[in-house]
Amino acid sequence: MNYFTTARSPFAPPVEFVERKGLGHPDTICDAVAEELCRYLARGYVERLGTVQAFNVDKAILAAGSVDIGFGGGQPVTKARLIVVGKADLTQWTPERDQLIEVVSAKLQELLPDADLDATFDVDVWLSPSSVDLSAVVSGRGEGDVPLANDTSFAAVSLPRSTLENLVFATEAELNGSAFRAEVPIGRDIKVMGSQSNKCEVTVAAPVMADKVDGPADYKEAVLAIADRAKEIAYRYVGSADISVNKADNDDTPYLSLTGSSAEQGDDGQVGRGNRFGGLITPYRAMSLEAACGKNPAAHVGKTYHAAAWDISERVVAEAGVAESTVRLLSQIGRPVTQPLAAHIEYAGEVDENQIIDIAQEALSDWKGIRDRLIDGFYPLY
């Protein structure tokens, strides 16, 4: 096992772009329901068998529907279809399909509280047996009952977030929060794009609930309220910023919604196409393209190594006193998850590099803690 440490300058790009797809975005919906089903299965295995068996439910697709919509409301024309597909070791526990569908449907309703799901969505789950070979790898254990990695993959995490990253994350969270939604008829499919160069610009796309606005004046009032709140949030982080909301609008095409999501009218979704681990899309940072949501929280390193890298990066900053840290972890299939093939920790500051390595080894050894925190929803996966 190779550990590498590298000192570097603080993250300060002359230009930076950051994106977040909000909780009602079709891609985020797929991530969220896959992860909810994953947590249900993992918890069920632990409660019944004391350990997480082989499974992955990291494939979900949302095929968009269609609606007839206008000021004052509308009607669904074609239902959207949400399908979660996965494999699982079903030899000792076979969960009921109806219960799996209920888990996914309940999460979907949580994400889209304004939606009449029966009228606008069809939900299905297909869970079939895992391959014998992969089940053998996952059920295999190293010293101390440590799970073996079921894939060769890598993870990358950088902390703390930059100012722009915090701004974008906070903008979506506050616009999607219950307090603001009680004041403004905003849907949950809120997308925020931030850019920073010689000035800061924030672009927001946010649906307005059709049944809560009677005409163009009400709609424009809602859009103005969204822009004002986004400007207030930006001011807390960067001072002045240029704010744009629903730039595709014209008099004939306001961004109205029945459900709060663009999945109702032509926008499909898929696991892994949206926010990366940490909840943002950050092209100026080291990133893995692994879709963490729905993956096995004990043995799938495409997920567990992101959680471990998050823990390491947080601890390096907090305990070693550096300004920031980027952690990359590389796995190899069949190796204990506590022993990556390689680990590379970059840091900005002055520190004893042996302390960084000690932190990394301690964090990786806590595989049960990582598993349990993933099952509990501790990490910002999407």
Image (cartoon, rainbow, N blue to C red):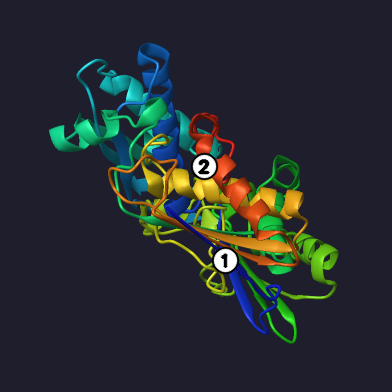
Earlier sequence position, callout 2 versus callout 1? 1
The local secondary structure at tag 2 comes to helix
Q: How many marks?
A: 2
- Residue at 57% x, 42% y is 363
Q: Nearer the viewer, residue 274 or 179?
A: 274
Q: Nearer the viewer, residue 300 or 267?
A: 300
- Residue at 43% x, 22% y is 43
Task: In the rendered view, tell whether residue 93 sits above or below residue 284.
Answer: above
The local secondary structure at tag 1 comes to strand
Image location (x, y in percent) of residue 52:
37, 26
Identify the amino acid type marked 1: Glu
Q: Quadrant of residue 91?
A: top left
Which residue has dot 2 on it? 364
* Residue 19 disc label: 1
Identify the amino acid type marked 2: Leu
- Residue at 74% x, 47% y is 180
- Residue 301 visible? The answer is yes
Task: In the rendered view, tell whether residue 29 sits above or below residue 169.
Answer: above
